[in-house]
Image (cartoon, helix red, strand yellow):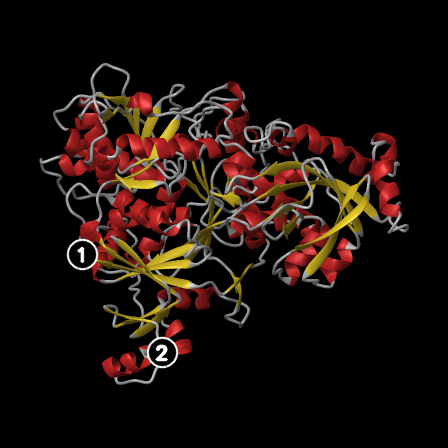
């Protein structure tokens, strides 16, 4: 189905693949009659051309990118604008769209969700932005319909910012990277590797975009072959896919840990822009005559079967056929993996879902930026037409991704067909994807066409003894399962017609409801603040020396941002840094907050000109040990705080709060064997935290130990590759080393200043 080349490859005329080898360039010459170098061929990818057009550094090895447009939603835009305001924001320098699709139910925390929405509306007026009210569209669907453009670049404060199928290179990052764009700064990265994804054939009936996406994720996630790289979709198979189908694959590229994605475009994409009244935004994109890719993946679409990603990760994939044929063996394997993910806190099993040899499902969800597309829902309606989900425990909820999509489903009868089955249609909302809606019952098993299925992401709480689980599937197989009254069923078993419906976009829906300043700022507008919207607390510069206490030690193979700062009920506190910080690591390590605050008290004493030993007497013994080797470390040149260790933190969401909450509680660093994503490491840096790397192996410290980093400020300034550190024990100082990895000069300055706010403060 999916094959990964160990080395790169040349693509000739978009159709011939020549794997990289000592003879590859000779073969290229024999087919083209031209001498081509690998350096030239690298410049012939679609991605290279777009990056070059947006790079301001003049150096294609060290990129400084300026984006064409920005987009955020209502659990990120308040913090972003507050940070930019603290740095002197006067107007949005590029189109900036504020959507409201995460806290849109306004169901938790009193008035605070709608307070955030009114903050967004008044800021759009004051600074010259666009405001999309709740229930109108999820962030990425609005961007597809109204923002994407051929050859353009969009930056979003949500990890699934992916519009590559429409010819737009889009990236999801933490809020501070959007702040930089609002302050006319740049997105600084090394030139990423470009991985070709070569498609052939066409999908069989019943196979949908989520099936293709899960097949890719299952093949590439563990190896990291596309990590922090750009996936470029090319080949003759692209033409067999509709725009919606391409979009459905594209949005899930985030789960491979790639940096971004881009697709070749054609008349299918031109028609998409025509339908949406934006014909001028279409641009034909294709690789040059000879393009070189640093990695290469081939996919025969005709061999893809209906897929399922079992709990608790999108890469835990099987074909539905394989799962049903080897049910108990696979469920045993899932239980073993779950024991690691859940730390044994609760009992977890899906074996009780097996009835008469069949796996029974409790809930189906088709929703959000991945599942709520027009074609997905139309296909689900066709598969379920004339069936009934029954009156037992199984439920099915369908969330169209935007009001224009919803309107067309009403007009073409698909909404009625679904409602007749017992399914429920709801408005555009991202809640089911991150635990703010449709949380299943305890021990329930949900199948979802959404983006992620991390532990507790669906809303259950381990600390309360709750556990539900989610498997990812395509809308078509979810519909087939629903039609079979909850028996897990692949859509390829459906033998009826799945029709192709013409889509008509009703622009009046947005014209009548969305506020668009058309880039004109109105400084006279007063921003509407709710009582929950708080400024960031004061943060100090990096001191000369650091004493850090380890306050959490996590040895899971991967730690997600959902575990670092849980989603769901915490969303209502995203505008309150101190309030949100109380939830940090609450599901993974409930002791973290108390331990972090305990050592933070010493740093607060330093900032207030008091003696830290008075508020934290045990530090006297720590300092006595440090003074045996570093007698000058002390008043005026030392800081105190916390750090965590995790093997590979930061998989998943782009949410900056995974880092900022640690900072608010006095965190100065993370120590890791590696970082799961660039965006999490960037979030640490932008919040003034040191992204330490330590070699794999037995740790030289344990949880609750004190660590000492002498001359840390000088080490950052001098760009030292290895940084000396010590474990402080009753037996003295035990030396070990860590690394910071590559940092730009600007990133070093941000760390030295203590955070991006301090770096930009006017």
* Earlier residue among tags 1 and 2: 2
Q: Is residue 367 left or right of residue 118?
A: left
- The answer to whether 652 is drawn above or below residue 184 in the figure is above
User: 434 or 224, which lies in front?
Assistant: 224
Between the C-alphas of marks 1 and 2, the distance is: 30 Å
Residue 168: horizontal and vertical position, in percent? Answer: 37, 56
Residue 346: horizontal and vertical position, in percent? Answer: 48, 23
Q: Which residue is mark 2?
A: 22
Residue 602: horizontal and vertical position, in percent? Answer: 80, 36
Residue 79: horizontal and vertical position, in percent? Answer: 58, 39
Q: Residues within 10 Å of mark 2 (few under 14, many from 20)?
A: few
Residue at the (69%, 42%) spot, across then down: 701
Residue 524 seen anywhere in this rendered image of the structure: no
Q: Is residue 329 left or right of residue 699?
A: left
User: 384 or 690, which lies in front?
Assistant: 690
Q: Which residue is mark 1?
A: 201
Residue at the (67%, 62%) spot, across then down: 721
Secondary structure beneath disc 1? loop
Task: Tell me the tag on residue 430.
Answer: none
């Amino acid at each position: 189905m999916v094959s990964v080349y160990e080395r790169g490859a040349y693509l000739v005329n978009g159709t011939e693949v020549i794997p990289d080898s000592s003879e590859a360039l000779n073969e290229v010459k024999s087919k083209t009659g031209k001498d081509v170098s690998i350096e030239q061929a690298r410049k012939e990818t679609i991605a290279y051309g777009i990056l070059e057009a947006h790079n301001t550094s003049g150096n294609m090895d060290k990129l400084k990118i300026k984006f064409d447009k920005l987009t955020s939603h209502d659990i990120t835009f308040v913090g972003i604008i507050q940070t930019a305001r603290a740095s002197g924001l006067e107007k949005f320098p590029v189109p900036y769209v504020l959507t409201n699709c995460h806290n849109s139910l306004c169901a938790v925390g009193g008035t605070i969700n709608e307070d955030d929405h009114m903050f967004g509306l008044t800021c759009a007026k004051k600074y010259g932005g666009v405001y999309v009210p709740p229930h109108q569209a999820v962030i990425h669907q609005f961007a597809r319909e109204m923002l994407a453009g051929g050859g353009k670049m969009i930056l979003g404060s949500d990890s699934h910012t992916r519009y590559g199928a429409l010819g737009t290179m889009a990236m999801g990052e933490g809020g501070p990277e959007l702040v930089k764009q609002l302050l006319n700064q740049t997105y600084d990265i090394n030139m990423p590797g470009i991985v070709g994804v070569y498609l052939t054939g066409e999908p069989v009936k019943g196979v949908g975009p989520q099936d293709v996406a899960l097949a890719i994720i299952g093949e590439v996630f563990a190896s990291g072959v596309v990590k922090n790289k750009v996936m470029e979709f090319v080949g003759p198979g692209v033409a067999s896919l509709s725009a919606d189908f391409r979009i459905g694959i594209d949005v899930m590229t985030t789960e491979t840990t790639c940096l971004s994605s881009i697709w070749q475009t054609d008349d299918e994409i031109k028609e998409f822009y025509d339908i949406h009244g934006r014909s001028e935004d279409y641009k034909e994109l294709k690789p040059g005559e000879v393009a070189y890719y640093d990695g290469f993946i081939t996919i025969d679409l005709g061999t893809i079967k209906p897929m399922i990603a079992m709990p608790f990760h999108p890469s835990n994939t099987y074909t539905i056929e394989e799962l049903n044929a080897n049910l108990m063996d696979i469920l045993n394997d899932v239980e073993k993996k779950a024991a690691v993910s859940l730390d044994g806190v609760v009992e977890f099993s899906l074996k009780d879902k097996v009835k008469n040899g069949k796996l029974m499902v409790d809930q189906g969800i088709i929703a959000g930026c991945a599942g709520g597309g027009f074609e997905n829902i139309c296909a689900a309606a066709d598969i379920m037409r004339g069936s009934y989900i029954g009156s037992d425990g199984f439920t099915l909820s369908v969330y169209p991704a935007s009001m224009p999509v919803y309107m067309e489903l009403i007009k073409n009868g698909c909404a009625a067909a679904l409602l007749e089955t017992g399914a429920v249609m709801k408005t555009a909302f991202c809640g089911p994807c991150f635990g703010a809606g449709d949380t299943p019952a305890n021990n329930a098993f949900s199948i979802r066409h959404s983006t992620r299925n991390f532990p507790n992401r669906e809303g259950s709480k381990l600390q309360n003894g709750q556990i539900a689980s989610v498997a990812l599937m395509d809308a078509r197989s979810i519909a087939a399962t629903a039609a079979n009254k909850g028996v897990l069923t692949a859509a390829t078993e459906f033998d009826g017609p799945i029709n192709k419906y013409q889509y008509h976009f009703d622009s009046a829906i947005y014209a009548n409801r969305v506020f668009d300043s058309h880039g004109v700022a109105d400084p006279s507008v007063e921003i509407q603040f709710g009582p929950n919207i708080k400024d960031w607390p004061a943060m100090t510069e990096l001191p000369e020396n650091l004493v850090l206490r380890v306050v959490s030690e996590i040895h899971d193979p991967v730690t997600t941002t959902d575990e670092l700062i849980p989603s769901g009920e915490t969303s209502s506190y995203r505008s309150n840094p101190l309030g949100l910080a109380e939830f940090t690591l609450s599901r993974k390590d409930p002791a973290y907050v108390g331990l972090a605050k305990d050592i933070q008290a010493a740093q607060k004493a330093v900032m207030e000109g008091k003696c830290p030993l008075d508020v934290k007497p045990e530090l006297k013994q720590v300092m006595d040990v440090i003074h045996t080797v570093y007698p000058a470390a002390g008043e005026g040149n030392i800081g105190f705080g916390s750090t965590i260790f995790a093997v590979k933190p930061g998989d998943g969401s782009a949410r900056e709060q995974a880092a900022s909450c640690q900072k608010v509680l006095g965190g100065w660093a993370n120590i890791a064997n590696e970082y799961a994503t660039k965006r999490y490491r960037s979030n640490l840096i932008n919040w003034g935290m040191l992204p330490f790397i330590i070699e794999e192996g037995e740790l030289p410290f344990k949880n609750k130990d004190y660590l000492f980093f002498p001359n840390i400020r000088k080490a950052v300034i001098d760009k030292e590759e290895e940084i000396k550190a010590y474990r402080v024990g009753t037996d003295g100082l035990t030396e070990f080393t860590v690394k910071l990895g590559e940092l730009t000069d600007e990133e070093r300055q941000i760390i030295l200043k203590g955070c991006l706010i301090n770096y930009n403060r006017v």
